[in-house]
Image: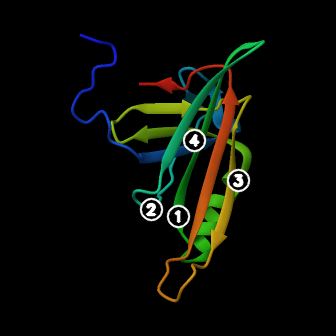
Amino acid sequence: MSILEQFEGDLLGSIKRIDAALHTQFESFNPAVFLSGYSWQQIAFTEETGQLRLSIRDSEQGKIYKYLGTFSIPKLRSAAEDAIEPLIGKLTVLKITDMNDRVYIIGAPNIPVSLELDGDSGLEFKSASAYVISFGIEQTWRAFST
């Protein structure tokens, strides 16, 4: 059997679930242990809008793993803004589950993921308005995967 042999379902794309935690909410990491009263918080996003990309390059310090991605949330009311705004910036650790049920934890308490928000009202009367959330990080370790 080849290590590159494909199995049914291996090529499913997109992100199934995104959970976030502020980098200050961890007691310890690897495995992630939260301070009392904190846990992963799911980010509800528009189905089929989640994407995670990985690039690996060599550097003088060794391999650099760069994770980039996007997802969209509806711009229906100010509650969506209020819920996502505390996560914007270099503040979070993300737990991402892909459509193959692989789980990746990107970032760490001392190296949080950067999130950016870009919203629009749509181009036409019938267009859905949305916020596109972009995230990215460069780290010296492969994302934890379970």
Q: Residue at x 59, y 36 (%)?
A: 36
Q: Which residue is mark 4?
A: 37
In the picture, the disc for residue 73 is 1
Q: CA distance from mark 4 to mark 2?
A: 28 Å
Q: CA distance from mark 2 to mark 1?
A: 5 Å
Q: Residue at x 69, y 54 (%)?
A: 116
Residue 103 percent location from the top left of the image: 43, 32
Q: Earlier in the sequence, mark 3 or mark 4?
A: 4
* Residue mark closest to the camera, 1 vs 4: 1
Q: CA distance from mark 3 to mark 2?
A: 18 Å
Q: Is residue 40 visible?
A: no
Q: CA distance from mark 3 to mark 1?
A: 14 Å
The amino acid pointed to by label 4 is Gly
Q: What secondary structure is marked by label 2?
A: loop
Q: Which residue is mark 2?
A: 46
Q: Is residue 125 visible?
A: yes
Residue 58 percent location from the top left of the image: 68, 17
Q: Earlier in the sequence, mark 3 or mark 1?
A: 1
Q: Which residue is mark 3?
A: 88
Q: Residue at x 66, y 29 (%)?
A: 108
Q: CA distance from mark 3 to mark 4?
A: 21 Å
Q: Nearer the viewer, residue 136 or 93?
A: 136
Is residue 34 rendered to the left or right of residue 111?
A: left
Q: Residue furthest right?
A: 60
